[in-house]
Image (cartoon, rainbow, N blue to C red):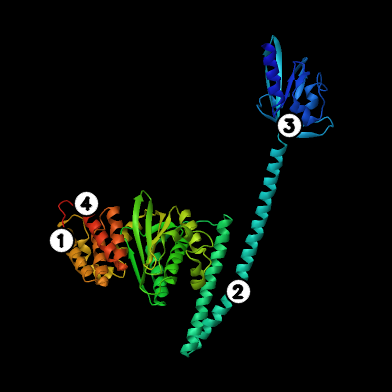
């Protein structure tokens, strides 16, 4: 029985993938397995009686006639070293040493794992990493040079076209010059997207947070988007929640880029109708606010299966879109990265032929200064949106959600809204929906979102959806206002 156990024991040792060496207290080898012989080139029995330090140099030392580890390895569990072959060459190994008493005698075991393949893999990974870094540097330099070289002729063409526009009186020639300027603007956008994408890929894109006036920012955006939509004969609407603070800290330039990408896309894919921007306050915790943006259009829309492609690099919802409208497919990919860097999310909704809605959230910090507190009330009376001026006389009605006067106004405008939808007078319905949204501005976040959805359905003249969301708004009001009924 004992003999069988020993045979089994040696069978296991000789078929191990580790090199195993058994030696005595003086460092004299009295056993080594077949794996060690295979890797070192020694024959059976050649190493018996040899000092283990001949195989593994600079690790084992003799002190007082007893073998031990060199001082630098005494507290090391796994030692990285080399194992010498018979021909005096060596290969990298990791060794562990254990000792014990067997049949009254001290027994020491050293196991070694061949690390040649592992070290080679590490070397190849390091080489590949260096090559990739060098390749990326070369690519970045190439992209920077190419975009610079492209900008020069584009700016030259644009500048000369603008000078000719000022001097030209002929209507047809003026139209040609406008087409040239439009092409230049498109080319500039493509160049900027390629450069931004290259920076994102290289991890060089940075968010530069600085204090800025949110309402000044919105004012600039409104002027720019009004010009953009007017040139295509579209209507532009802008609604901004009054609760949003004016003094904020964030990257104004990148926020401009996000909105510009989304609104420019909406205009590009919309031939008639309108493009709208909605901005609401999601949450406000201490010195941070989360803002919710919606860019809505009545353009070509998108199908559910197209949504997954939208935010991928060099991808558009449909290949025919690239042929008809142009573009690199980078704008939305860059937008997603920017939104993520500003601690937000972006998503899209829509139906084929019924327009689309692109929504995103971002987080901004707020400035708590006395000046900001004093300025905000006057700033909030600024003329947002196209519809808010009409409601200036109703501002004192926007107090508590459940006040008697507010409930009376809610019922009145819901009645007007229903009549407008029955008559399919969508322009009137949109005006009443905007008024209702202001009347419920003190309501919950759920109520605000339902109002957004209702307003968007009305703008798309989607009767079924508009009625569905109108009913949901009423149900939510019943939950939030005691005794409210319509």
Q: Which residue is mark 2?
A: 152
Of callouts 1 and 2, the N-terminal one: 2
Within 10 Å of disc 1 (Cα), the crowding (few <14, some 14-19, many 20+) is: few
Residue 343 spot, x, y in % from top left: 44, 52
Of callouts 1 and 4, the N-terminal one: 1
Task: From the viewer's side, name the closer residue of 102 and 253.
Answer: 102
The answer to whether mark 1 and mark 4 are in CB contact below 8 A is no
Residue 408's tag is 1
Q: Can the viewer see residue 395 in this picture?
A: yes
* Disc 1 secondary structure class: helix
Structural distance between the alpha carbons of marks 1 and 2: 62 Å
The answer to whether mark 1 and mark 3 are in CB contact below 8 A is no
Q: Is residue 411 left or right of residue 58?
A: left
The answer to whether mark 2 and mark 3 are in CB contact below 8 A is no
| Residue in view at x 66 percent, y 53 percent | 132
Q: Which residue is mark 3?
A: 81
Of callouts 4 and 2, the N-terminal one: 2
Structural distance between the alpha carbons of marks 4 and 3: 73 Å
Of callouts 1 and 3, the N-terminal one: 3
Of callouts 2 and 3, the N-terminal one: 3
Residue 480's tag is 4
Within 10 Å of disc 4 (Cα), the crowding (few <14, some 14-19, many 20+) is: some
Give the total of numbered labels: 4
- Quarter of the figure with the N terminus: top right
Residue 283 spot, x, y in % from top left: 34, 52
Corner quadrant of residue 243: bottom left
Q: Is residue 38 left or right of residue 295?
A: right
Structural distance between the alpha carbons of marks 1 and 4: 15 Å
Q: Nearer the viewer's eye, disc 1 or disc 2?
A: 1
In the rendered image of this protein, does residue 140 appear above or below residue 108?
Answer: below
């Amino acid at each position: 029985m004992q003999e069988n156990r020993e045979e089994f024991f040696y069978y296991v040792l000789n078929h191990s993938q580790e090199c195993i060496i058994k030696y005595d207290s003086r460092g004299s080898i009295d056993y080594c397995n077949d794996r060690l012989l295979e890797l070192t080139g020694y024959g059976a029995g050649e190493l018996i009686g040899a000092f283990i330090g001949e195989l593994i140099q600079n690790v084992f030392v003799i002190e007082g006639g007893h073998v031990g580890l060199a001082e630098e390895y005494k507290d090391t569990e796994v030692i990285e070293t080399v194992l010498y072959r018979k021909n005096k060459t060596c290969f990298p190994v990791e060794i562990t040493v254990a000792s014990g008493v067997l049949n009254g005698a001290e027994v020491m075991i050293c196991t070694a794992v061949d690390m040649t393949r592992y070290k080679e893999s590490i070397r190849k990974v390091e080489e590949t990493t260096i090559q990739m870094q060098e390749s990326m540097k070369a690519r970045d330099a190439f992209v920077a040079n190419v975009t610079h070289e492209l900008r020069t002729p584009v700016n030259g063409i644009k500048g000369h076209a603008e000078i000719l526009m000022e001097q030209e009186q002929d209507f047809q020639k003026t139209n040609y010059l406008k087409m040239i300027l439009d092409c230049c603007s498109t080319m500039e956008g493509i160049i900027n997207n390629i450069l931004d994408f290259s920076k994102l890929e290289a991890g060089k894109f940075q968010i530069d947070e600085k204090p800025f006036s949110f309402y000044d920012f919105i004012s600039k955006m409104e002027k720019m988007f009004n010009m953009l939509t007017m040139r295509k004969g579209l209507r532009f609407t802008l609604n901004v929640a009054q609760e949003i603070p004016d003094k904020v800290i964030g990257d104004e330039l990148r926020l401009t880029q996000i909105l510009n990408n989304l609104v420019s896309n909406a205009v590009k894919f919309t031939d008639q109708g309108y493009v709208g921007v909605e901005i609401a306050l999601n949450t406000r915790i201490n010195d941070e606010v989360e803002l919710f943006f919606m860019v809505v259009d009545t353009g070509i829309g998108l199908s559910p299966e197209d949504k997954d492609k939208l935010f991928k690099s060099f991808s558009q919802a449909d290949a025919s879109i690239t042929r008809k409208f142009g573009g690199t497919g980078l704008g939305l990919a860059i937008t997603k990265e920017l939104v993520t860097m500003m601690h937000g999310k972006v998503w899209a909704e829509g139906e084929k032929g019924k327009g689309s809605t692109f929504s995103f959230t971002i987080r901004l910090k707020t400035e708590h200064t006395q000046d900001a507190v004093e300025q905000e009330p006057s700033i909030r009376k600024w003329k947002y949106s196209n519809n808010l001026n009409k409601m200036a006389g109703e501002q004192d009605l926007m107090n508590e959600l459940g006040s008697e006067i507010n409930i009376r106004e809610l019922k009145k405008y819901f009645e007007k809204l229903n009549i407008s939808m029955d008559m399919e007078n969508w322009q009137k319905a949109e005006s009443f929906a905007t008024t209702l949204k202001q009347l419920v501005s003190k309501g919950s976040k759920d109520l605000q979102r339902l109002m957004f959805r209702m307003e968007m359905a009305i703008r798309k003249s989607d009767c079924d959806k508009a009625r569905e969301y109108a009913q949901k708004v009423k149900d939510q009001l019943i939950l939030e206002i005691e005794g409210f009924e319509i």
